Image (spheres, rainbow, N blue to C red):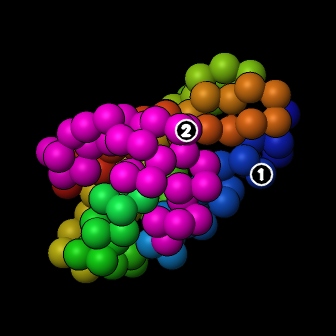
Amino acid sequence: MGDKLDASIGPVISALESGSSSDLARFFDSSISMNINGQQGEYSKNQAEIVLRDFFKKNPSLGFSIVFQNENPGSLSTYIGEYSSNPGKFQVFIKVSENGSSFRIYSLDFVKS
């Protein structure tokens, strides 16, 4: 059970580690609630990727790790991670809905720690 979920969240962790907005956006729901450093909004998948690309450009990744996970297979799961970047660290809150084989991020927050 854990392995299946790790396979799902795995590419998300890799995308955050490498600061790749395009890799991350592949997992976005068609609309996503995002809060990037206090800039809160509901975004389409494409808008969200543009906002993220800008964030990653200003805050190049020095690594990402999951510090907490509350997984509910077949339902809603929450992950909290720490994103390290050149200007500083951010807490990352990732909310995911899982339905069968689909794994979608519907909420993503970056909060400066």
The numbered disc on residue 33 is none
In reply to whether residue 42 is colored magenta, the answer given is yes
Is residue 16 placed above or below 31 in the rendered structure? below
Residue at 42% across / 43% down in the picture?
44
Which badge, 2 or 1, is on the more N-terminal residue? 1
Determine whether, in the image, residue 99 is placed left or right of residue 80: right
* Res. 89 image quadrant: bottom left
In depth, the one of 26 and 46 nearer the eye is 46
Residue 69 covered by magenta stretch: no
For the point 30% across and 77% down, the residue is: 57
Tell me if I can see residue 75 in this picture: yes
Asked if 23 appears above or below 97 in the picture, the reply is: below
Q: Residue at x 36, y 62 (%)?
A: 50
Q: Where is residue 60 in the image (x, y as percent from the top left)?
A: 33, 78
Q: Mark 2 points at which residue?
A: 29
Residues 69 and 101: in front is: 101
**Given the image, on which type of amino acid does mark 2 rest?**
Asp
Question: How many angstroms separate mark 2 from mark 1 (CA)?
Answer: 18 Å
In the rendered image, residue 35, in percent from the top left (x then y), is placed at 26, 43
Q: Give the range drawn in magenta.
A: 20-48
Q: How many neighbours does mark 1 have within 10 angstroms: few (below 14), some (14-19), or many (20 or more)?
A: few
Can you tell which quarter of the image residue 88 is in?
bottom left
Q: What's the mark number on residue 7?
A: 1
Secondary structure type for disc 1: helix
Where the N terminus falls, by quadrant? top right
* Residue visible at 45% across and 54% down in the picture: 46
Q: Can residue 82 be seen in this view?
A: no
**Residue type at tag 1:** Ala
Q: Which of 11/68 is in front?
A: 11
Is 69 rendered above or below residue 87? above
Around disc 2, counting alpha carbons within 10 Å, would you say few (fewer than 14), some (14 to 19), or many (20 or more)? some
